Image: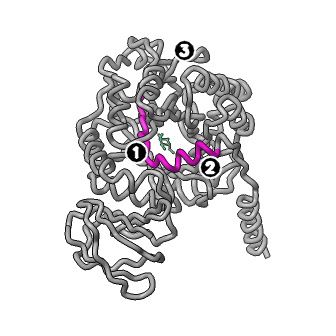
Amino acid sequence: MRKLLITCCCILSTIYLFSQEYKPSPAIRESQQQFLDNKFGLFIHWGLYSILGNGEWVRTNRSIPEKEYDRLMDQFNPYKFDAKSWVRLAKQTGMKYITFVSRHHDGFSMFDTKYSDFNIMNTPYGKDVLKELAIACKEEGIKLHLYYSILDWKHPDYHFETGKTGKGFERYQSGNWDNYITFMKNQITELLTNYGEIGAIWLDGHWDQLDNDYNKDLKPKVDWKYEEIYSLIHKLQPSCMVANNHHLNPLPGEDFQIFEKDLPGGNSTGFGGQKVSRLPLEMCETMNTSWGYSITDTAWKSVPKLKKLFLQSLANGSNMLLNVGPLATGEIQEQIIERLNGLGQWINQYATAIYGTRAVNYPINDEFVLLKKDSKVFVHFIEPPLKKFVLYVPYQIKTIKNLTNQKTVRFDKIEKDYYLLHIDDQETAALELQL
Ligand code: FHN
């Protein structure tokens, strides 16, 4: 009986989730379409933690007392930071937007804020890096999205008592949660008022107030007041999308769904397992294994591996947000630049077969992916194709063009939906099927 009751509850909650009508405004709908067209973004994790070269969780992982961590503020001086070169690097790689970490869990604001002294203006650098980035993005036609941590290891009003993280250092007792909500709203208002057009606010940290990541029905131990926060975002900038990396099924008011280090539907990290919604999707991934700069992390993914991840994420209907963790000086490691250049070369060559496409309902496999745009279907090879290549596609093909050498590809129809392609070039990376 109990089992039956639980099953009924699960079915009902699923029906509820998918029947809840999501009605985005025309402005959001337009942003979503652009987002779907744009495919590729650069994630930037950069802050005081970059000085220590031990990832963005260093304060918690090494239980650094507040007074000692605060000293990093006197050392942050990114004298080699050049916003334009970061934005150009993203652009050359074929990325259409940048998601910048405006404040991570350490609570340090990488922007000029009236609501906390723990911010970039009080470092020796003394300039608003976010402002510089916003200007460069505007000049280069790159959209700017802002990551904002709702978890805070420093703010006295954050409800750390019920939180899972940040336990290894002293915290003040019993803050005022309403003050914390107001603080976040004030900062989000600054972000959406002082930096021009913002494409999305990307929240992170909800999971701190859950006992675990795998039970997707858990209720958080605090009231995050999402209704108020989301409507504030939509009111301040009607075309600014809301996304929340809570690792759960989307909540009302969210405009795209995030997957962390897993393709939609996957769960190799323990963060996954949520339902894949009908919202636009975004998968974020690291280039080695760290988000923030790590001095010892040499587990770099190769260009072919990153290309495969990107293609498979597109085939799953998801954008890819690829992370870099710059040094505290503002430099980006050459291992990252090499990989971005490698990806950029390929993406720019096959741009028409990537941007503006949509996923098709086709089994995900390790050899190739299919993407569709109007009356064209593109085949992107993950592995080089055989000279005689049998392709199953549920379409009537009129002609096939090899996008690597621009030649026409001969093909025979074997039977309904099965084609034998004669590929004359082993380097072939993509084909265009005209339907
Ligand atoms: O704790 C963060 C982590 O540092 C990083 O920012 C990633 C990016 O998706 N999100 C959190 C973990 O879910």
For residue 105, the mark is none
* x and y, in percent, of residue 17 in the image: 72, 58
Quarter containing the C terminus: bottom left
* Lower position in the chain sequence, tag 3 or tag 1: 3
The magenta span reads 29-47
- Residue 211 is tagged as 2
Q: Earlier in the sequence, mark 2 or mark 3?
A: 3
Q: Amino acid at mark 3?
A: Asp
| Residue 235, percent from left and from top | 71, 31
- State yes or no: discs 2 and 3 in contact (Cβ < 8 Å): no
**Secondary structure category for the residue under label 3:** loop
Name the quadrant containing residue 113.
top right
- Structural crowding at the residue carrying mark 1, measured as other residues with C-alpha within 10 Å and reported as few (<14), some (14–19) or many (≥20): many
Name the residue rendered at 54%, 45% in the picture: 34
Q: CA distance from mark 3 to mark 1?
A: 30 Å
- What residue sits right under mark 1 in the picture? 322
Res. 238 image quadrant: top right
Which element type, helix, strand or loop, lies under badge 1? strand
The amino acid pointed to by label 2 is Asp
Residue 34 among those drawn in magenta: yes
Ligand 1 contact, mark 3 (Cβ < 8 Å)? no
Residue holding disc 3: 117
Above-or-below relation of 228 to 302? above
Q: Is residue 27 visible?
A: yes
Is residue 168 in view? Answer: no
Image height of 316 relative to 306, above or below? below
Q: Earlier in the sequence, mark 1 or mark 2?
A: 2
Percent from the top left, x then y, of residue 153? 55, 30
Q: Amino acid at mark 1?
A: Leu
Residue at 68 percent of width and 43 percent of height: 26
Q: Nearer the viewer, residue 407 or 51?
A: 407
With 173 as the anchor, is 299 left or right in this view?
Answer: left
